Image (cartoon, grey):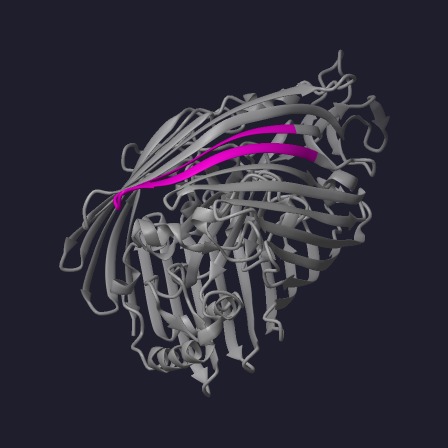
Amino acid sequence: MRVRGVGGGSGCVGEIHRIDPGGWRAADVADTRIFARHRTAVAAMVNLCCVMAAAAQPPTFESMKALSLDQLANIEVSIVAKAPRSLVDTAAAAFVITREDIRRSGATNIADLLRMVPGLQVARIDANKWAVSARGFNGRFANKLLVLMDGRSVYTPLFSGVYWNVVDTLLEDIERIEVVRGPGASVWGANAVNGVINVITRSAQDTQGNLVSAALGDETRGVGVLRHGGRWGEDVFYRIYAKYRRQADAVLPSGAQANDSWHDVRGGFRVDGQLSAVDSFNLQGDLYRNIAAQTTEVPDLDTTTVLTTQRNADQGADLLGRWYHRYANHARGTLKIAYDYQRRDETSDIRHTVAADYQYNAVPLGRHTLTGGLGYRLIHDDIPGNTVLRVTPTVNNNMLWGAFVQDEIDIDRRFRVTLGSKFERNDYTGFEYQPSARLSWRLSPRHTLWAAVSRAVRIPSRTENGIVATSSVIPAAPPLAPLATAVQVRGQTGFLAERLVAYELGYRGRYGHDLSVDGSVFYNVYHRLRTIEPGALYGSALPAFLIQPLVLMNRMHGESYGFEFAADWRTNRRLRWQLAYTFLDMQFHRDAGSRDPSAESIEGQSPEQQFSLRSSYDFGAGLDLDLWLRGVDRLSAPSERVAAYTTLDARLGWRPARGLEFSLVGRNLLDDRHLEFRDEANASKASEVERSFHLQATWHF
């Protein structure tokens, strides 16, 4: 049995839930600490409350009201330590998007939700593609940000990045989104370099009853959701869902239609059950088919490029199972097994991924609390290739083994030191280690200082080891250039892991019951960053043309620094203000011998400054208004140059009856349209974000 804290369930203090999707039970803490002498009474109260909760009506929107500042500070997050810790005690630049934030955002996809996180750069490339990163290095395949869904990695090993149009679920079923800026590699492993995002969905017990939701607008042409939750017997709960999305074509900067529409159909299930007093489980899965169009420039030997429209029909499925066990000494163990299948038209690849890991959380022993785990991942892919892109070998198996250990040491009531490291062995670069040291100092119950030093690596992608891709063609121009020249990007088996050493310092504080602030500063030092080095020009016959190879190498280093600030001010019971500001500076330098003329342009792929101001006002009688003002600095990279822009979103919500809500959302209200990002690989033409409106209705019953 478990008493869920302020971050779970419907978001209210002391709500009782019998089954916990994360496997952590308040009874575990009670047995080992302050309630050791009264465990029988506590268990009886929890059992009684569980029976009452099971008989309760479906959740209403009233149970999703914004948490108080004290409640927010005590939300438990597990993304930093792989064990629940209150946000105020977390020695990292962590941020939580709550269920209430999601409901009032007006967003219809996960990528747009992440715009509210300070330190993240989120930009739309076209109607179905996003560039999302933390602390710089933004791009369609931002390779230094690890993204998870319920702890299952959705980071693609083909290009090192995330296909955001297939990272989706019912937004109503998301419990919270945990984000940490800065390295998380000591527990999550390779590629958790500049940040980690974990989208955590609600347990099946928390989604009982039925839900119907629909959205319709000029850009969002249709989003439809059906979900049903039920139970089998006393201890097993389930839900099933189906979702449909249709997004209209955007426009190119020229004003022409971008031909980048987006259709997505998906469905899934989740089952949570209690097997015994010490064992519980959950099993969940998803199935999707995604059709995303794009306008691309395809290289051709007769002309520079041929502008074409592609419709990529991608499909995939995933299955995740977790078993939780509490040992006799009240230590906890979690076994997780995941399977992921993807088939993508754009890259002509088929991928199967199997991952398994076991985690052990020991009970406190004196001042020490140990956490450790073992993990294994196997990726099998088949990439037949096409006339523009091929990868060798065509069929490949890649394995990764890993283990981590972490020790939280309570020096006294005010100081906590966390030491840990991840140890991994991969097929590309061999053995890698990723340690971290974190210090948390409670100045008072309302004020905390923290500091951290971490090391992280990004291991090579499949393409960096074996890609041959024609990026552009220079047409023949007799008599000086009698033959056309094909520019080809090539990977190599000697590509090394990129390395980071990060230094961080942060502060969290609450002033009275109305204001909280959160700030962090960082200094990152990078080595062995990717460059594209020109090779020797050579000829090819039948047909006759020249080839200019560009070889991927590790010949750049540099540093970045910046700070991130967030404030939450509750003016009164009805009005809330949320402010965020980010500053970032990046300085990179080519190593001796590098001839990549564009290497240092990575400095201009992320905005130097960003700000966000959200206001939420409750009029009463079920009526509320949300305004969201954002400003993003210009992008100065030569190939991705984008002007600075400011946007305003608005949402008006009305709840006329229990479980029923209507909302009208307006996006980008300050201008007709604006550009946010250009695909750094020029694989698709960037389209502009237009002013748009949509109406949404949601019914819980």
Answer whether residue 683 is magenta in the image: no
The answer to whether any part of residue 518 appears in the image is yes
Q: Total marks drawn?
A: 0
Q: Position of residue 183 (x, y in %)?
A: 60, 41
- Front in this rendered view, residue 557 or 221: 557
* Residue stretch in magenta: 499-525
Residue at (65%, 44%) from the top-left corner? 191
Work out whether 92 lies above or below 314.
above
- Front in this rendered view, residue 116 or 601: 116
Work out whether 409 lies above or below 264.
above
- Front in this rendered view, residue 14 or 198: 14
Main SS class of the magenta portion in the image: strand
Residue at (18%, 46%) from the top-left corner? 572
Work out whether 338 lies above or below 167.
below
Residue at (83%, 39%) from the top-left corner? 493
Q: Position of residue 453 (x, y in %)?
A: 61, 36
In which quadrant is the C terminus drawn? Answer: bottom left
- Front in this rendered view, residue 664 or 321: 321
Left or right? Give the position of 388 relative to 646.
right
Work out whether 690 lies above or below 154.
above
